Amino acid sequence: MKLEMNDSPGQLVAALKPISDVGGNIIAVIHQREPDLAKGTLNVQIVLELPDGKRERLVELLQEQGVHIQRIGEERLLYKRTVIMIGHLMHTDLSDTVDQIDSTGFAEVSELSMSMPAVNQRSSSRITIKALSKVDMESALAILRRVSAQKSLLLIEPLEEIA
């Protein structure tokens, strides 16, 4: 799911606690401290598993916390590829790179791990993308290729393909 919340201390914890309260399991949280200054909000993406029948209660609890749910849904993305990006990922706005994939509606970043040796050195990130179809996956990878070229990042692809 993708959430929008107020940019204030404790909001991330307030958004994560309801997941635990309904018996959910958090698999990944993608959160960069880059607020939308005009709206005073932050975006957070969460990959999670929920017990059957708990989605509606989770939505209620999140709304009670003042968290806006931008997207929530079941697994619908059947194709998976993993790539490596190397470069100054944080300085070139990694959240923008992720958003360019996630905003397509047909693909999203499902896993992201990063290694950052030092502030002035290049970092590397292992990024897993899921898509609706092989054609959609190729479109998502084309977006990553374009973004990598624009931001002077090295893209190593694909590490695997699972359908």
Image (tube, helix red, strand yellow):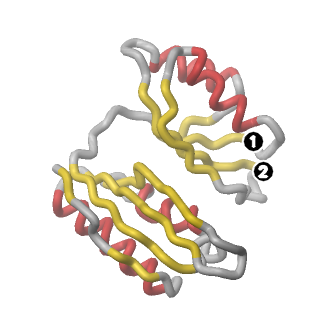
Q: Is residue 100 above or below residue 80?
A: below
The quadrant where residue 141 appears: bottom left
Label 2: few (<14), some or many (≥20) within 10 Å? few
* Cβ atoms at labels 2 and 1 below 8 Å apart: yes
Residue lying at 49% horizontally and 66% vertically, measured from the top left: 125
Q: Which mark is residue 23?
A: none
- How many badges with numbers are in the image? 2
Determine the residue located farthest toward the right in the rendered image: 9
Provide the secondary structure element on which disc 2 rests: loop
* Residue pointed to by mark 2: 40
Q: CA distance from mark 2 to mark 1?
A: 6 Å
Residue lying at 78% horizontally and 59% vertically, measured from the top left: 37
Q: Nearer the viewer, residue 79 or 63?
A: 79
* Residue pointed to by mark 1: 6
Type of the residue with mark 2: Gly
Q: Position of residue 53 (x, y in %)?
A: 40, 12
Type of the residue with mark 1: Asn
Residue lying at 63% horizontally and 43% vertically, measured from the top left: 4
Q: Is residue 76 above or below residue 18?
A: below
Q: Position of residue 75 (x, y in %)?
A: 31, 36
Q: Position of residue 82 (x, y in %)?
A: 33, 61
Q: Is residue 71 above or below residue 31?
A: above
Label 1: few (<14), some or many (≥20) within 10 Å? some
Residue lying at 83% horizontally and 40% vertically, measured from the top left: 9
Q: Nearer the viewer, residue 33 or 114?
A: 114
Q: Position of residue 20 (x, y in %)?
A: 58, 21
Provide the secondary structure element on which disc 1 rests: strand
Q: Nearer the viewer, residue 21 or 136?
A: 21
Mark 2 or mark 1, which has the lower sequence index? 1
